[in-house]
Image: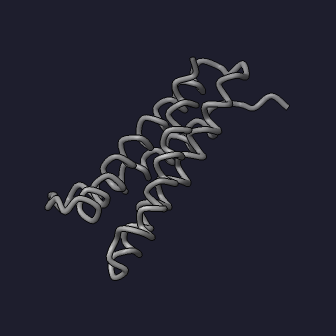
Amino acid sequence: MNKTLLLGAFLGLTGVIAGALVNHWIDPQYAGKVISAVRLQQIHALVIVAIGLSFYAALPDGLARNLKIAVGLFTLGIALFSGGIYLRYFFGFSIEGILIPIGGAIVMLGWLAVMWAAAWHKASG
């Protein structure tokens, strides 16, 4: 089983569900904030799917390891950023406001991990 591909598909599915709920459940004055969370989740779900598909190729161990680190960072960032916004606006939980920006920063670290992988591992061809 390709856990990364499965994770990306799950995040994509739940991102679509969250997007649909925005149109039917969220007060329109807050919809923009929630759509930011949906967008971040959906974009990074696609990135995680692409990384999961790349594992079907013969990747050097170091490259695969760096990409797995990126997936972990993306997943944690989505959980904190998007999850924090969802908890606040879908369920009314008053969460600590610092979790959301920390989640965004962790997503940025995920992109740095992808950059690291690209910079230090030669592509064939």
- In the picture, residue 30 is in which quadrant? bottom left
Q: Is residue 55 left or right of residue 67?
A: right
Expressed as whole percent of the image width and height from the top left, the position of residue 75 reads 41, 41
Q: Is residue 120 left or right of residue 25?
A: right
Observer-nearest of 117 and 55: 55
Observer-nearest of 10 and 119: 10
The residue sitting at the right extreme is: 125
Q: Residue at x 50, y 61 (%)?
A: 39
Q: Is residue 52 left or right of residue 84?
A: right
Q: Residue at x 56, y 39 (%)?
A: 48
In the rendered view, tell whether residue 89 sits above or below residue 77. below
Expressed as whole percent of the image width and height from the top left, the position of residue 2 reads 58, 22
The residue sitting at the bottom extreme is: 29
In the rendered view, tell whether residue 120 sits above or below residue 62. below
Locate the C terminus and report the quarter of the image it occupies: top right
Q: How is the image coloured?
A: one colour
- In the picture, residue 26 is in which quadrant? bottom left
Observer-nearest of 90 and 56: 90
Q: Residue at x 47, y 53 (%)?
A: 17
Expressed as whole percent of the image width and height from the top left, the position of residue 20 reads 48, 62
Expressed as whole percent of the image width and height from the top left, the position of residue 78 reads 39, 49
Q: Is residue 122 left or right of residue 35?
A: right
In the rendered view, tell whether residue 79 sits above or below residue 16. above
Observer-nearest of 98 and 29: 29
Q: Residue at x 57, y 17 (%)?
A: 1
